[in-house]
């Protein structure tokens, strides 16, 4: 890295020019990125996906892209509202591309509903919500609502944008700026933003390339921006701090940059790879939308590392000394903080060195206590109960739910494939339909069954379509249990003729399939990430024990974050702080939390332990290595963690439960990581392990292709004078 850094400095004009060209080209390419991103959500190979494809291809509808017009009038007015509702729904269907009015019927004494189907995905259908409401108009003496999953997504979009603006722009960014100003103390706090301004658009340009060939989520830009800024802060803090340290030691600018790259730069290489491995976990998930996040998670740390080892050395060589002359806090405070011999972290390390067992045991006990509620973890596919209830679409849903059942908006769609044209009219199939509908009507979860009407049989007479409306919303346990009962008991008991295929689709079945697909693959992918990370850290730390310790502590930290989610939402401990009590944790959240937290936590681990390894190589004194490593990097790791904590807490400030859960899980884990884990548990555990921390025998070193680190003999005890 020394020679590489000097090469970057020698060709600094070329390096700067190349990055300017890359950023400009990236800006042009990524300008069209939003047009390629989508919120389409598919489950390849799932039974619910097959049912949905049949409904789209043969019935002209996409269940998730359908709408409901709900009209509530005075008590007993339902029959008189049927015709006005039909007229309003017909106008609304005309404003929806491929829209078709399916049925109009009274569902209570004062409520009439009309169902409008289309062939559009929810991400496309939601764009027509406003036009449909305008076309539907009003009905005198009644309240009209346009609802449906697409309408809910449309109404949620401005809420999400407002929440993100308040949380990130008004809360997280000012806090991050204050922390950076305090940590850097000079105008150098701008360096992380320079690095981020290069890495983020370059990554988005790569995302644009892939978006032309695969489905990627609209939220990828948020993920790239958030993680890109966090990583830029991390790498800039580490490298600028080391550069300053070398300059204070009397080295020239070029030598200081070279040494920085040979030490902190090497740590950044391993750190970026560790982050990429953790986030790339999602690339192997069986769900396309998760694979998209895995792609972005792989790209942003790799691009950030490339910028950090090429552009940042040039920026430090050119700008760091000049920026340091512009102090934003008093010089004496900066100098006192930089004194690693007497700063807070050195004193803390000294205290832990005297009582490592007590600190380690107390820290582990706290983590296990925080993780304990995870035993009550209840996963779900999401629910409309977790969103603001004052939206028009949600109000319409609540009216419909009160009249029919909470499952009216997303019923279970049962598709019968007889495998032959005209098969729907055969006696054996009709008998099976009668047995099936009879059992459905007798099921405790089902509020209504729709087995007749224009959408009951397709034009070829091969397929039949039955809707089962549940009493509970699609994401709740009762609805999911019904799907299992339907597939395992009710459908087999209907005894359809041999060769007939019966598929369960719709909202409840989609939720069950989503969880099954996700968590069928997740444990194996976690194991793969742990193994890859262990190999990487053995090479980074040249130790067999330290990578194992890092993985175990990371798992403890993530387990504690999961437990805090259960405590805050399911058990209601977060209600006094503005969080919504909710029994379920949305199923995508533990996967995303693991991927992001495992990567970011390893980021901090590499920063901390790499410096300890450097001190050990210089002194062969474990206590001094741990103390000095913590003293010289503790402030940086804590500052970086607090910035990420502020960014993630921006999600918690919103009003959507799923984002609250995601933000709190990330924020809690990062806070635990930079306090309990890095500041307390890592140093105390390393004091207990002693010289075994640094052991890598020759045989293992050959396998991992690094320099061996033999177990040095402990210092010989001082000889006592004879007779004493």
Image (cartoon, rainbow, N blue to C red):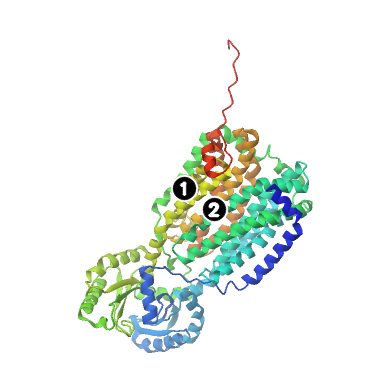
**Residue pointed to by mark 1:** 370
**Residue pointed to by mark 2:** 599
Relative placement, left or right, of 236 versus 91 is right
For the view shown, which residue lies furthest in the top direction?
Answer: 723
Q: Residue at x 47, y 60 (%)?
A: 284
Say which element carries label 1: helix
Which image quadrant: the C terminus?
Answer: top right
Q: Is residue 10 visible?
A: yes
Q: Is 188 or 91 nearer to us in this picture?
A: 188
Relative placement, left or right, of 326 versus 193 is right
State the CA–CA distance, disc 2 to disc 1.
Answer: 21 Å
The spot of residue 164 in percent (x, y) is: 57, 65
Position of residue 436 relative to residue 689, above or below, is below
Camera-nearest label, 2 or 1: 2
Q: Are there few (<14), some (14-19), or many (20+) residues within 10 Å of tag 2?
A: many
Q: Residue at x 23, y 73 (%)?
A: 496
């Amino acid at each position: 890295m020394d020679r590489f850094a000097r090469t970057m400095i020698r060709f600094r004009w070329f390096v700067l020019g190349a990055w300017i060209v890359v950023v400009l080209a990236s800006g042009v390419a990524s300008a069209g990125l939003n047009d390629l991103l989508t919120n389409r959500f598919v489950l390849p190979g799932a039974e619910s996906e097959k049912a949905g494809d049949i409904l789209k291809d043969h019935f002209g509808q996409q269940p998730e892209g359908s709408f409901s017009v709900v009209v509530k009038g005075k008590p007993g007015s339902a029959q008189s509202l049927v015709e006005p509702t039909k007229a309003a729904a017909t106008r609304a269907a005309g404003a929806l591309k491929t829209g078709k009015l399916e049925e109009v019927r009274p569902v209570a004494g004062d409520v009439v509903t009309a169902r409008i189907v289309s062939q559009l995905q929810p991400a496309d259908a939601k764009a027509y919500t406003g036009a449909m409401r305008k076309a539907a108009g009003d009905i005198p003496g009644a309240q009209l609502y346009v609802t449906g999953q697409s309408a809910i997504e449309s109404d949620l979009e401005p809420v999400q944008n407002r929440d993100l603006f308040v949380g990130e722009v008004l809360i997280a960014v000012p806090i991050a700026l204050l922390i950076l100003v305090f940590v850097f103390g000079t105008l150098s706090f701008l360096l992380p933003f320079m690095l981020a301004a290069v890495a983020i658009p370059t990554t988005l340009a790569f995302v644009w390339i892939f978006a032309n060939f695969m489905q990627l989520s609209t939220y990828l830009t948020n993920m790239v921006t958030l993680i890109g800024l966090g990583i830029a802060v991390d790498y800039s803090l580490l490298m600028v701090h080391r550069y300053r340290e070398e300059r204070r030691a009397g080295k020239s600018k070029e030598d200081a940059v070279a040494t920085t790259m040979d030490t902190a730069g090497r740590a950044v290489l391993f750190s970026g790879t560790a982050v990429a491995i953790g986030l790339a976990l999602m690339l192997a998930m069986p769900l396309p939308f998760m694979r998209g996040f895995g792609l972005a998670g792989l790209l942003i740390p790799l691009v950030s590392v490339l910028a950090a080892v090429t552009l940042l050395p040039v920026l430090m060589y050119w700008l760091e000394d000049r920026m340091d002359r512009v102090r934003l806090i008093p010089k004496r405070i900066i100098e006192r903080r930089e004194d690693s011999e007497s700063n807070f972290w050195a004193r803390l390390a000294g205290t832990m060195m005297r009582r490592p067992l007590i600190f380690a045991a107390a820290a582990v006990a706290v983590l296990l206590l925080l993780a304990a509620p995870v035993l009550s973890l209840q996963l779900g596919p999401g629910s409309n109960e977790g969103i603001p209830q004052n939206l028009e679409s949600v109000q319409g849903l609540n009216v419909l739910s009160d009249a029919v059942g909470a499952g009216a908006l997303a019923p279970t769609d049962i598709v019968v494939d007889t495998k032959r044209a005209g098969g729907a009219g055969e006696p054996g199939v009709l008998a099976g339909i009668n047995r099936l509908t009879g059992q459905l009507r007798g099921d405790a979860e089902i509020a209504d069954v729709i087995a007749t009407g224009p959408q009951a049989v397709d034009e070829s007479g091969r397929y039949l379509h039955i809707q089962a409306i549940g009493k509970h919303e699609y994401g709740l346990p009762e609805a999911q249990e019904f799907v299992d009962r339907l597939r395992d008991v009710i459908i087999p008991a209907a005894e359809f003729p041999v060769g007939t295929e019966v598929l369960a689709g719709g909202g409840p079945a989609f939720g069950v399939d989503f969880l099954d697909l996700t968590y069928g693959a997740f444990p194996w992918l976690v194991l793969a990430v742990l193994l890859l990370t262990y190999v990487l850290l053995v090479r980074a730390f040249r130790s067999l024990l330290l990578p194992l310790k890092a993985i175990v502590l990371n798992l403890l930290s993530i387990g504690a974050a999961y437990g805090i989610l259960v405590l805050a939402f399911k058990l209601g401990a977060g209600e006094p702080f503005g969080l919504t009590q909710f029994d379920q944790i949305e199923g995508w959240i533990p996967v995303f939390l693991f991927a992001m937290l495992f990567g970011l936590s390893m980021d901090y681990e590499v920063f901390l332990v790499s410096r300890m390894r450097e001190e050990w190589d210089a002194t062969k004194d474990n206590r001094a290595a741990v103390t000095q490593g913590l003293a010289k990097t503790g402030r940086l790791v804590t500052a970086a963690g607090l910035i990420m904590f502020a960014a993630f807490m921006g999600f918690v400030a919103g009003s959507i439960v799923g984002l609250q859960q995601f933000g709190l899980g990330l924020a809690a884990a990062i806070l635990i990581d930079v306090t309990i884990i890095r500041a307390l548990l890592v140093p105390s555990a390393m004091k207990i392990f002693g010289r075994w921390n640094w052991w890598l025998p020759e045989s293992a070193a050959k396998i991992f292709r690094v320099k061996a680190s033999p177990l040095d003999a402990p210092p010989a005890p001082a000889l006592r004078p004879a007779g004493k």
